[in-house]
Image (cartoon, rainbow, N blue to C red):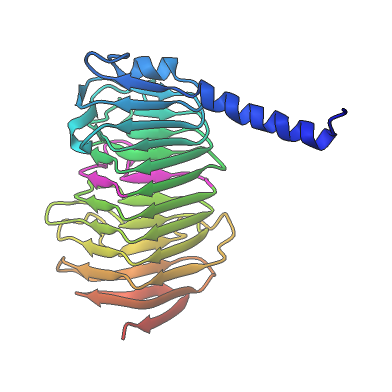
């Protein structure tokens, strides 16, 4: 009996899914495991694999080239530590594959000679970062891959940043499609910005972004080339040692180079803990910023530039 073309297509698709599930593997990293170092697992990893890194301190770096890859620490994130060694003069972890997830580990003390080292250097199409601690890196996350989407959730950024040469930041994303940061904590950033985004769309939702008493950061959020932005439900503070006291959220100051269809800054809590005047939002685009429902304390003016301010109830 003849089999229809449609049935053949369904069978072929089912077989492809089954084959992919069979080929996907779990690679274990740690003492007594299949791979002693993350870099060895990165060399062996294939598309669809999961890499599990067991507790330990790994003086190592890795370039993750496989796609549809998960790299995750086992147990507490602060017990799985990757530190000190940067690959390619770039980062502790470099991601070049598409659709990579990195979760539940610590990336610390990334340093390179040009002072632009990162915990993660994103060079692939899609990156998801969950539950990762970035401690005392030059950049926490750095990505310049055009067209990518970068999502960061439930992560910690402490004591990152430098302006030793070109400035480095907590997160610095180039001309991507999307940067979304949610439910994460930024503190004690040094000289650079906590978050700098040149993405077509930037979403900063439900985070804590504070200088603290010792942080010397510039802006809390810098969106230098415009692009749509939604900044909602965050707790933010500029501290007494901030090196740039002019504003907390800056939009378009380096020239608007992409469509800016929406600027919504809503339901945030912002405190100026320094003895100086500052703006909460400085908008250099021609798109009206909707600054609505924010709770602001200290010597703060809510908006510089085009837009509307609606006070919190």
Q: Is residue 69 magenta?
A: no
Residue 98 in picture, x, y percent from top left: 53, 33
Q: Main secondary structure of the magenta part?
A: loop
Q: Residue furthest front?
A: 1
Residue 166: where, in percent of width, then height? Answer: 35, 38
Camera-nearest residue between 151 and 209: 151
Q: Is residue 147 visible?
A: yes
Query: Looking at the image, is 43 positioned above or below residue 20?
Result: above
Image position of 235 with respect to 185: above or below: below
Q: Quadrant of residue 35?
A: top left
Is 215 left, or right, of 42 in this rendering?
Answer: left
Quadrant into which the N terminus falls: top right
Which quarter of the figure is the C terminus placed in? Answer: bottom left
Q: Residue at x 73, y 35 (%)?
A: 10
Q: Residue at x 36, y 34 (%)?
A: 120
On the rendered structure, is 149 left or right of 186?
A: right
Residue at 22%, 62% in the rendered image: 238
Q: Position of residue 128 (x, y in %)?
A: 42, 42
Q: Residue furthest bottom?
A: 313
Magenta highlight on residue 169: yes
Q: Nearer the viewer, residue 208 or 9?
A: 9
Residue 121 or residue 272, whichever sits in front: 121
Q: Which residues are magenta?
A: 154-176
Q: Nearer the viewer, residue 305 or 215?
A: 215
Q: Position of residue 268 (x, y in %)?
A: 31, 70
Looking at the image, is 211 positioned above or below residue 132? below
The residue located at (31%, 56%) in the rendering is: 183
């Amino acid at each position: 009996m003849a089999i229809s073309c449609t049935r053949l297509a369904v069978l072929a698709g089912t077989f492809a899914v089954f084959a992919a599930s069979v080929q996907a593997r779990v690679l274990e990293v740690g003492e007594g495991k299949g791979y002693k170092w993350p870099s060895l697992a990165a060399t062996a990893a294939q598309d669809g694999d999961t890499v599990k890194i067991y507790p330990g301190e790994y003086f190592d770096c890795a370039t993750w080239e496989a796609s549809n890859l998960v790299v995750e620490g086992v147990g507490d994130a602060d017990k799985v530590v990757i530190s000190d060694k940067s690959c390619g003069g770039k980062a502790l972890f470099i991601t070049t594959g598409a659709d990579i997830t990195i979760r539940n580990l610590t990336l610390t003390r990334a340093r390179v000679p040009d002072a632009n080292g990162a915990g993660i250097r994103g060079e692939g199409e899609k990156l998801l970062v969950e539950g990762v601690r970035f401690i005392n890196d030059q950049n926490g996350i750095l990505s310049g891959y055009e067209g990518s989407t970068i999502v960061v959730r439930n992560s910690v950024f402490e004591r990152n940043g430098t302006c030793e040469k070109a400035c480095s930041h907590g997160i610095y994303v180039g001309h991507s499609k999307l940067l979304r940061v949610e439910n994460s904590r930024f503190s004690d950033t040094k000289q650079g910005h906590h978050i700098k985004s040149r993405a077509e769309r930037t979403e900063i939702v439900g985070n804590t972004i504070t200088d603290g008493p010792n942080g010397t950061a510039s802006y809390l959020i810098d969106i230098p080339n415009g692009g749509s932005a939604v900044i909602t439900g965050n707790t933010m503070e500029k501290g007494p040692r901030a090196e740039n006291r002019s504003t907390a959220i800056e939009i378009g100051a380096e020239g608007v180079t992409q469509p800016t269809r929406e600027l919504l800054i809503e339901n945030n809590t912002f405190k100026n803990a320094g003895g100086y005047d500052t703006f909460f939002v400085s908008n250099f685009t021609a798109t009206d910023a909707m600054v609505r429902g924010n709770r602001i304390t200290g010597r703060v003016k809510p908006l510089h530039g085009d837009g509307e301010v609606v006070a919190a109830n």
